Amino acid sequence: MRTSIATVSVSGTLTEKLNAVARAGFDGVEIFENDLLGSSLAPEQIRERASDLGLELFLYQPMRDVEGLSADAFARSMRRAEHKFRVMRRLGVDTVLACSNVSAHARDDDALAAAQLRELAVLADEYGIRVAYEALAWGRHVNTYDRAWRIVEAADHPALGVCLDSFHVLARGSDPEGFAAIPGEKIFFVQLADAPLMGMDVLQWSRHHRLFPGQGDFDLAEFVRSVVRSGYDGPLSLEVFNDVFRQAESGSTAVDARRSLTALQEAAGVLQLPAAVAPTGIAFAELVTMDTEPVTVLLQALGFSRTGKHRFKPVDLWEQGAARVLVNTEPATGGSGPRLAALGLDSPDPGAAAKRAESLGAPVLPRRRARTDVLLETVAAPDGTELFFCASGRQDLPDWLDDFAAAGDAVSQAGSITGIDHVALTQPWHQYDEALLFYRSVIGLRPHGGVDVSDPYGLRRSRAVSNQDDSVRIALSIDPAPGASHRASQHIALATDDIVAAARRIGAAGHLLPVPDNYYDDLGARYVLGPGELQTYRALGSLYDRDGRGSQFRHFYTRTIGDVFFEVVQRDSGYAGFGEQSAHVRLTAQHAQRQA
């Protein structure tokens, strides 16, 4: 189906919006009236600019408070409408959105509304324009799509139909199955928006919390299926506005929007894409730094050994158990570091995983490689993290480890690290929802429930994604807002089968993040622990959590170096969380370290 987005859904001038929307691959746009009024371009120039970009102008909006009016008010409304119709002719737009009346003076009279909408449609028809009547969820009297349809049906004019907006329908709890009662040709336009389920005023919910499809809690796939079953064959258009998109860069927002609409069409069964190929493990985490000494000291303290060196690039391989960390000193990577720059994701079919990513607008990254290098498919996540689709130890696929020559160090047996438990990536404030959609739709990971974590200087949202067996876990959290004095750190969580031995090793080397005594006083009050257990945790700076089924999670953190730190965790097999109960303690301790 053709794709569209309202210009109100991206930031910038109208010209910037059109350019961003065209680059993202949309077929057309809805022109929001404020964007037209604020533009220095004449309607004819806007029409020409859109045409040059390959964009169709599908809709002009909004036309407000046009029905249920007194005679005088309706006459004024018709005069304003005729002006809009002239402008639309100049723009080359043939459909206008008319919203249900929200005025306190509106009359609760469906017959009057139908008569006035019919008169509006007669006038629109003279200009070759159709009127799409939309029931706003907060409309004074008409606030459900079925009532809007009854009024349109009673008006009985070919230039009058309905607009179905997923937010207005689903926020009211209406059932999209009722679309079957509306002939497809009378559905003039379809707008799509997702949203989190929230208990608040519907107008404020709509204005500040709409999201792109797949980023909220609405069942938009069934909404689209119901629309398609009705016989509708027009464009699917995104109308999303919230406080983040209005401030974020228009290009990345448009790409995120296009990806969301593509994934939604796939979920609704109206578009076929290359199948998702979920990763089966974390092959490696890559740190970038111009000064290797702090990283080397910390990795050695954790029990890692330098086991390999890339044959052609300044990249070292450090291993312990199944955990692998690459340390890259390539100047082109920029910054002093260390920072977490890339993840290697073991994939059963790296080529297919890359095709899936490309079909959903994920940028495939060019790589400088020698002729004998293993070909690794690489894409960029929204925050710039590079994701490598690769294979480790597979006989049927090229092994990325073949690019490394032995460094002469034996794998250390002194440590107790067994692998990478999870990776935590802190997202820029305006890309958190985009990242969740990216890892779900592009990478094939499933989202878990979100949590709010208190920070000494604010509240952080966090949500994890994982593959089906949790062998790949990525925890996504939100970065401080613009203007914050520092960037939040990323971290690598390493799995261990002996948290006490690991903590003693790190503590002896002086790399443990200190934990306040007050935490342990509270811990002893919250849980009944074994003899000496609390004292051990206190002495080793370790933290503890237990879920409702009794599964336990023990962990500790290293001090931060650059923009990265390590966590070491020991989890019972049934424990699915990340120790959220103690996250505020860690954040407070890290702030204290940063200020020391």
Image (cartoon, rainbow, N blue to C red):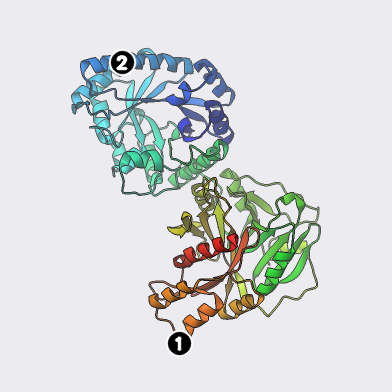
Q: Residue furthest front?
A: 596
Residue 65: image tag: none
**In 3D space, how far apart are the residues under numbered discs 2 and 1 (Cα atoms)?**
82 Å
Q: Amino acid at mark 2?
A: Met
Disc 2 + disc 1, Cβ < 8 Å: no
Classify mark 1: residues with Cα within 10 Å, few (<14), some (14-19) or many (20+): few
Classify mark 2: residues with Cα within 10 Å, few (<14), some (14-19) or many (20+): some
* Towards the viewer: 240 or 28: 240
Q: Is residue 393 above or below residue 369?
A: below
Q: Secondary structure at mark 1?
A: loop
Which callout, 2 or 1, points at the residue further toward the start of the chain? 2
Q: Secondary structure at mark 2?
A: helix
* Towards the viewer: 104 or 535: 535
Question: Residue at position x 43%, y 76% from top?
Answer: 521
Provide residue 442's location: percent of width, then percent of height.
55, 50
Question: Residue at position x 48%, y 86% from top?
Answer: 532
Q: Is residue 391 above or below residue 411?
A: above
Q: Residue furthest bottom?
A: 531
Q: Amino acid at mark 1?
A: Pro
- Image quarter for residue 202? top left
260 left or right, relative to 208: right
Identify the residue position indicated by label 1 in the image.
531
Residue 226 in sight here? no
The C terminus: image quadrant: bottom right
Identify the residue position indicated by label 2 in the image.
78
Residue 462 in sight here? yes
| 2 vs 1, front mark | 1
Provide residue 560's location: percent of width, then percent of height.
62, 63
